[in-house]
Structures are given as structure tokens and as C-alpha cells.
Amino acid sequence: MSKSKRAKPAETNAQLRIIGGRHRGRKLPIPSLPGLRPTPDRIRETIFNWLQFDLHDKLVVDCFAGTGALGLESLSRGAASCQFVEPATPAAKSIESSLGLLKETTGTVHKTNASAFLATMTEPADLFFVDPPFELDLWQTTLEMIAQRSLLSEYGFVYVECPKTKAIELDETWLTVKDKTAGNLRIRLLQQVNIGS
């Protein structure tokens, strides 16, 4: 007599800590999955120092959500809403659980990939996080799609995180507002200079 096997839930011995805003100090369980790489606290501190005056009531898209660290931090710090884009079921469910634990009702998880989600967007967003798994090499195509579909609002920002050795070609429509290397990472904040012209 065989019993039906149920899929084991992803291990959740790792934690994500919210570092600022109304949920500051909250610790959330995250699944231990291969390739899941939450943005380190020190890097997040830098990002949100850059964005501290540009988050309130903003519409955010976390294109490669993973643990949800960047989007959850945005909501904690006053963003109006966040669209979390994450195709992996255990990671997507973990983000939904975190939103529930924080009682955040303006975060929505989309179990799809970034290109499919961006293709369905009908209104621009104010902030995009572009931090894909490094092995997928999706920085260029994601930035091009945001630009070609005019998905970034006027005065909006795109945050890009990649290995410091990775070359990303930015045409004249992109302006680098902030640029920093930390360890093996390069982090940048971009705007589009032709929006609204």
C-alpha cells in the first residue's frame, strides 16, 4: 500500500530583516533555495538612502523579487504599492506569507517572469528594481523593455544590481544618478532623460 507523497515545503531556516520604516527590525522567514540571493543589509541601506525622498506614495515593481527584500523594504518605507515578480513557486509563496505577516495589503505577487510581466503593464511605475539572478544575464533586455514600452514614469528611477565586472550598455536616454561598487557588486540608480520631452 503506497501513500501519496506530498512535496516537502522549502526549508525556512534563513531570515530577512527589514532595516527601515514602519516595519524596521521585523524578521521574516525566507526559503533556503539554490540561487536565492537576498540583497545584503549594507547594500539595502545604501539603496534606500539614495531613495529616501523618492519613495513615499510611489508605485514600485520588483522585477526579480526573490526573497522580496527590496519590495518589502519599499513598502515599509512608504511606497504606495509594490508588484513582486517571481516565477519560482516557493519564493512567490514566501513573499505572500511575508506580506501577510506584515499586514501589507498593497503588495501583489505575480508568479511569472519579468519579461512576461513587463509586456502586460499598461501604466508606468515610479521605481523598478532590476536585480536578476546573475547567471541569467537579463539586465540589458529588461532595461531595453522598460525603455521601449515607456514603463518608467517621469522622474522615476531604475535600480540595477550586477557583478562589478558586468558591462551594461546604456544609450543616451539613460542617466546614471548614483553609481557605487561594494565588494563584487556594482549598484546603480538610473533615470531616463527623454521622458516628458
Image: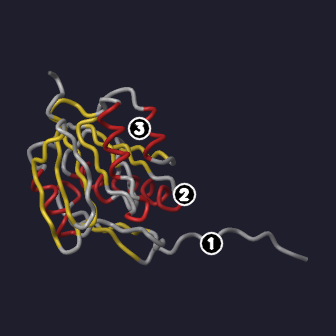
Which quadrant is home to the N terminus? Answer: bottom right
Q: Give the vertical position of 64 relative to 116 (above or below).
A: below
Give the distance between the C-alpha atoms of the residues marked 3 and 2, in whole angstroms.
19 Å
Residue count near mark 2 (Cα–Cα under 10 Å), binned few <14, some 14–19, many ≥20 = few
Q: Which mark is residue 8?
A: 1
Name the residue tied to disc 3. Answer: 118
User: Helix, strand, or loop for circle 2?
Assistant: helix
Which numbered disc covers residue 89? 2
Q: Nearer the viewer, mark 2 or mark 1?
A: 2
Query: Where in the figure is residue 160, as x and y percent of width and height?
Result: 25, 53
Q: Give the distance between the C-alpha atoms of the residues marked 1 and 3, in whole angstroms.
A: 32 Å
Q: Earlier in the sequence, mark 2 or mark 1?
A: 1
Residue that appears at 48% across and 40% down: 116
- Mark identifier at residue 179: none
Q: Amino acid at mark 3?
A: Leu
Residue drawn at (19%, 75%), measured in percent from left and top? 183
